[in-house]
Image (cartoon, helix red, strand yellow):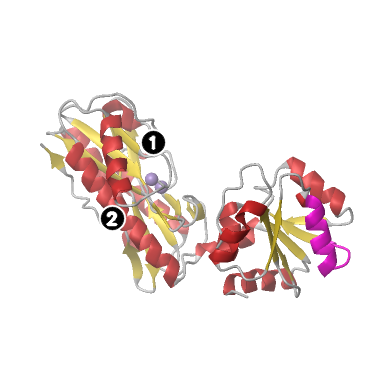
């Protein structure tokens, strides 16, 4: 049994949980190595204190599970089977009455929860999410390696984006060119919908790219990420098209100063709150506090947002092996939107920055 399953099992033993039934694609992948998006069909990984785990999935995916390296029982079902009956039989074969079961409460929907309640009427259900988040928060060497690859491709994407900024091009023109270049390199999935925003649009932290033409004197904001072997990267760069005014420059310099300072204090022993506040104070002291309306960053891995959450109130202590984003921004409506985002890996000595596209203001002619 792999180390990740062992870790979950140890937690179950400590907490008297007889069965964990994990149903999100991300956590099933983390524990088994098998990834699928089952849509409305049931996918589940059942883990026990002593007995053999099993994985239940649509029958047409059984061969893919085998190839993924899962070497415990696989239960495939057809579209005319009732998979819940199979879950019940398979659990009953292993253990007696279920009193304590762990499920992903955030992922589970009401219909499935009611199904489980009727199958195991005497069981109480606890959340497995917090434990799974903590397990996934510390990355191993293999995870780091694929994330480094994902980050290198994100750097390449920004490079392509900058080269595509030209008179008359729209946000969507540039976005299409970026994704086309990535697909030619074999990238099949982005971490989220790519953002290319210019001018006033960039002053919205989560804007939608459209047919706005990029004009001289605009700042252009790229926010994108590439998925490699199921792991995400996430980078933001803001570049200038032609000469920008002093106000835009001041905002850029403030964000950069805050971003560099937060990287500097990112090391084992610091808290997430300290890291956030380091950047937030610099932005507030420059008079832009009210224009930085979001947390400093978020953990990154199989999901594009995971633990740790880098907020000004999170007292979580930073540890070796964490990967998170550092992405302060200032968004002044009608003036400018600037965000600079890197992904960092925490080592004993501090933050190793995984995204390396230059951060000195790039002025494209
Ligand atoms: Mn981002
Ligand atoms: Mn991000």
Residue 245, x across and y down, in percent: 15, 32
Residue 294, x across and y down, in percent: 44, 42
Q: Quadrant of the N terminus?
A: bottom right
Q: Earlier in the sequence, mark 2 or mark 1?
A: 1
The residue labelled by disc 2 is: 260
The residues bearing labels 2 and 1 have C-alpha atoms spaced at a distance of 20 Å
Q: How many marks?
A: 2
**Residue 92 on the magenta span:** yes
- How would you classify the magenta stretch by its main secondary structure? helix
- Asked if residue 4 lies left or right of residue 182, the reply is right
- Asked if residue 275 lies left or right of residue 245, the reply is right
Quarter-wise, where is residue 96 in the image? Answer: bottom right
Considering depth in this image, is 315 or 32 the residue closer to the camera? 32
Whether ligand 1 has any atom under 8 Å from the Cβ at mark 1 is answered as no
Q: Which residues are magenta?
A: 84-99
Residue 221, x across and y down, in percent: 28, 38
């Amino acid at each position: 049994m792999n180390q990740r399953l062992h870790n979950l099992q140890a937690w179950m033993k400590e907490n008297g949980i007889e069965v964990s039934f994990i149903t999100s694609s991300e956590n099933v992948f983390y524990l088994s190595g098998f990834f699928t998006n089952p849509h409305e069909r049931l996918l589940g990984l059942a883990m026990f204190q002593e007995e053999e785990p099993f994985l239940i999935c649509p029958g047409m995916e059984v061969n893919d599970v085998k190839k993924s390296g899962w070497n415990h029982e696989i239960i495939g079902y057809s579209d005319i089977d009732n998979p819940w009956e199979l879950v019940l039989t398979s659990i009953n074969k292993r253990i007696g009455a279920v009193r304590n079961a762990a499920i992903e409460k955030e992922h589970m929907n009401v219909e499935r929860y009611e199904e489980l309640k009727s199958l195991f009427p005497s069981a109480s259900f606890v959340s497995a999410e917090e434990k799974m988040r903590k397990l996934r928060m510390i990355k191993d060497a293999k995870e780091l390696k694929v994330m480094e690859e994902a980050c290198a491709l994100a750097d390449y994407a920004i490079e392509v984006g900058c080269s595509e900024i030209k008179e008359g091009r729209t946000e969507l023109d540039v976005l299409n060119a970026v994704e086309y270049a990535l697909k030619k390199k074999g990238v099949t999935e982005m971490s989220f919908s790519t953002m290319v925003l210019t001018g006033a649009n960039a002053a919205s932290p989560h804007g939608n790219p459209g047919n706005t033409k990029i004009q001289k004197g605009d700042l252009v904001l790229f926010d994108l990420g590439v998925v490699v072997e199921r792991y995400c990267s996430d980078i933001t760069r803001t570049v200038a098209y032609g000469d920008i005014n002093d106000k835009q420059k001041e905002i850029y310099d403030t964000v950069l100063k805050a971003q560099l300072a937060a990287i500097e204090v990112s090391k084992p022993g610091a808290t997430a709150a300290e890291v956030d506040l380091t950047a937030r104070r610099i932005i507030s002291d420059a008079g832009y506090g009210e224009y930085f309306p979001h947390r400093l960053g978020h953990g990154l891995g199989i999901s594009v947002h995971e633990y740790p959450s880098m907020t000004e109130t999170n007292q979580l202590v930073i540890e070796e092996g964490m990967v998170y984003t550092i992405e302060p921004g200032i968004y002044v409506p009608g003036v400018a939107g600037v965000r600079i985002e890197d992904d960092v890996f925490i080592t004993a000595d501090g933050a190793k920055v995984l995204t390396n596209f230059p951060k000195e203001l790039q002025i494209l002619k």
